[in-house]
Amino acid sequence: MATGTIIDVVMPQMGVSVSEGTIVKWLKSEGETIEADEALLEISTDKVDTEVPSPGTGVVAKILVHEGETVDVGTKLAEIAPEGAGPAVAEPEPAVEPEPAAEPEPAVEPELAPEPATAAAAAEADAPSSAESPGPAAPAAPAVPAETPAPAAAGDSSENGKSFVSPVVARIAAEHGVDVGTIQGTGQGGRVTKKDILAFIESGPAPAPAAPPEAAPTEAEPVAPAAPTEPSAQPTAPPVIANAQPQAAGTGETLEPMNAMRRGIAEHMRRSLDTAAHVTSAIEVDMSKVVAIREKLKASYQKDYGVNPTYLAFVGRAAVDTLHDYPWINGELRDDQIVTRNYVNLGIAVELADGKGLIVPVIKNAEGLNLLGLARSITDIAARARDKKLLPDDVQGGTFTITNPGGYGTFHGTPVISQPQAGILGTYALVKRPWVVQDALGNDVLAIRPIMNITLTYDHRLVDGALAGRFLHDVREKLQSWGEDRY
Amino acid sequence: MAERTYLQAISDGLRQEMRRDKRVFVIGEDVGVYGGAFKVTLGFQEEFGAWRVIDAPLSETAIVGGCTGAALMGMRPVAEMQFADFVSCAWDHLVTVAAKQFYRAGTPVPMVVRLPSGGGFSGGPFHSQNPESSFAHIPGLKCVCPATPEDAKGLLATAIEDPNPVLYFEHKHLYRRLKAEVPEERYTIPFGEARTHRVGEDISVITWGAMVHTADEAAEELAKEDVSVEVVDLRTVMPWDRKAVLASVEKTSKVLVLHEDTRTGGFGAEIAATIAEEAFESLDAPVKRIAAPDSPVPFSPPLEKAFIPQVETVASGLRELAAY
């Protein structure tokens, strides 16, 4: 009775490149009623964490994927039965199943009989032309019967299915017991090519299986070539392909699966360092004027708009302004082209509440926002990031990023560029320091000034050191000369 | 060894066979007094006489029909079609009679039909075709497509010796363009044995005829980009050397099948299908075909250039495969 009206809940596609998601939490359990668009579960993908709304009104009839499990986009997660139809869900299935199993088989079998006969007839017909040929060679004699290669268990190798595995790669993977998913691909769309897998196999085993327990805990030193004590224990000789099997936890260790976001971060950080030539320059900024103006604005911004004019907003505003004069720092290397833009999509690195993860939502067209606008946007995306309310679009298309790890007092850092951008600005702790300034008479005097270190980490492939230095200089000048007109 | 053009090599080979075997004779339009439209048989009538170098009326039907009869009677006729395109007039004799005669009656038809084929000189739709795949489809016919002077001579000798009807496609564009060392003595090159024109590691090009040289030039381009391309010259399209093709595919795992004939139903389709059937587990990329589009051969030089696969087209196809 409920047939056809059951609504499937599937893992949504949270961005073009996202292929899987992890169930963080079910907000409803089986049997509970739910309204259309009411939050049903929380998921985590390598782009965003978000709530998935119910596609229909009814009762949560079945939950098929449990919390903590990671599944491909499109995988059915649950069934919603329209109200009143709930309990019927299970029924039709057993009723259908037994039937198809038995019948078709006998129907097929008799057909097998005629085949040998046909084949024999064909063989006979062939005979005169090829067998008795004293003179002429057989017309178009067939080539040597090709040996059929041994069937290789192809399909099983890459369960993540992130890209196409070609037949030859599947075969080699099966022959060597390699998981294709662990190989870095260089083919189209990151596909693992034959060369990739052969190189992978040739490069030998990945970190060998855990060393025997006796050896492990004490010796952290690199293995000295001298020590000939236990050659057999050294996992060097047999090129056993590491099966990427999770190793068991050692004493005092705890194992915890990586979630999609952590995996995404790990992959991205590694890729970024492998891609860009990272260099960091730092500059010290006297924030006296900013501090003064912020004090002035704070109350009115809070009262009138409910927005806090953070230092980040000031720095962001100065950086966005300065980027206008440094298009390459707001640019990108795309193949052998340099991309520049007439807009700034400003990424802001936001730490998630539990301290496990970080997300970089993007403020689109930041060049069009004044101080208030930028402060408001930062507040908005930071809140939505922490509440897991970001949309896929919110984390895409950044052209430059600011990260603000100074909240805990760090005064310097070398952040990693968010690919494919060319730079990331770091802002650090605002600290009062003795500072040499000039008094009205032009004499050097010591003053107490709020100083902030600002870093620019840039891709040296595109951005030269001098350019980065000039950029930081200009950002500093903007911040140090901040006037009330520059809201 | 002497340097001979592709055309001279054919001429030399034919002359050698005629001197060696009195059963061999030549028949065709203007092959005698005029020495052939392309001068392959220039001076033949003087040497062998009008009975062995016969000027035929403008009827391919008559030429091939006559050859079939002569072959059945024990002669070794070599017919010349002025252009390969005209062989369609002789389709019935070739396909219905010559190809099936041995199967039906056990009487061999040792006949060679020479077919000046291929484009590249604005010959238009009636003087530029490459009809080898049509005949390769007919059981009982053999199709030879030499790409070099040396192969041209050796394969012609094999063709004349072969007891079956053999279609010998000689590419007009190679006639005077190609020059290479050719042994002066008689030699034969077996049918069904491909020749590796260029050894490579990354991509295989399977081709024949004039496209061997197009592929080689494209491979030269790719070599500059550090992609190593193997060029396999089939030499004979029927029978064709599956073993060599599959071995090359096994090695490189990426294949481009290239021919000058039009795409649909071209012999490249047969090769691609065989690779899919027998070398599937060796493939690291889809089998790629480059061929002429499904249209008559245009007269206009720019259109003809767009029609016949060019070095740049092949190079970009190879780049695609390399990047896959």
Image (tube, grey):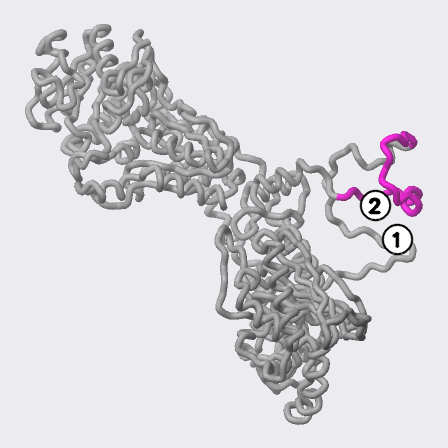
Magenta span includes B223: no
Quadrant of the rendered image containing residue A116 = top left
Q: Locate the N terminus of chain A and report the quarter of the image it occupies.
A: bottom right
User: Residue A219's spot in the image, x, y percent?
Assistant: 91, 43
Chain letter of disc 2? A
Q: Tell me which residue sits at (22%, 35%) in the image.
A: B129
Q: Is B106 on the left or on the right of A159, as rendered? A: left
Whether residue B100 can be seen here: no
Give the Cα distance between marks 1 and 2: 10 Å
Name the one closer to the observer, A309 or B126.
A309
Q: Residues within 10 Å of mark 1 (few under 14, many from 20)?
A: few
Helix, strand or loop at disc 2? loop
Q: Residues within 10 Å of mark 2 (few under 14, many from 20)?
A: few
Q: Tell me which residue sits at (18%, 42%) in the image.
A: B300
Name the one closer to the observer, B298 or A363.
A363
Helix, strand or loop at disc 1? loop
Whether residue B263 can be seen here: yes
User: Residue B141's spot in the image, x, y percent?
Assistant: 28, 27
Quadrant of the rendered image containing residue A301 = bottom right
Task: Report the magenta stretch's main SS.
Answer: loop
Q: Is A21 on the left or on the right of A188, as rendered? A: right
User: Residue A193's spot in the image, x, y percent?
Assistant: 56, 43
Q: Locate the C terminus of chain A and report the quarter of the image it occupies.
A: bottom right
Q: Is A101 on the left or on the right of A407, as rendered? A: left
User: Residue B60's spot in the image, x, y percent?
Assistant: 12, 28
Quadrant of the rendered image containing residue A348 = bottom right
Which segment did they paint magenta?
A: A207-229
Say which residue label 2 marks: A210
Say which residue label 1 marks: A250
Q: Is residue A266 above or below residue B263?
A: below
Cβ–Cβ below 8 Å for labels 1 and 2?
Answer: yes
Q: Amino acid at mark 1?
A: Gly
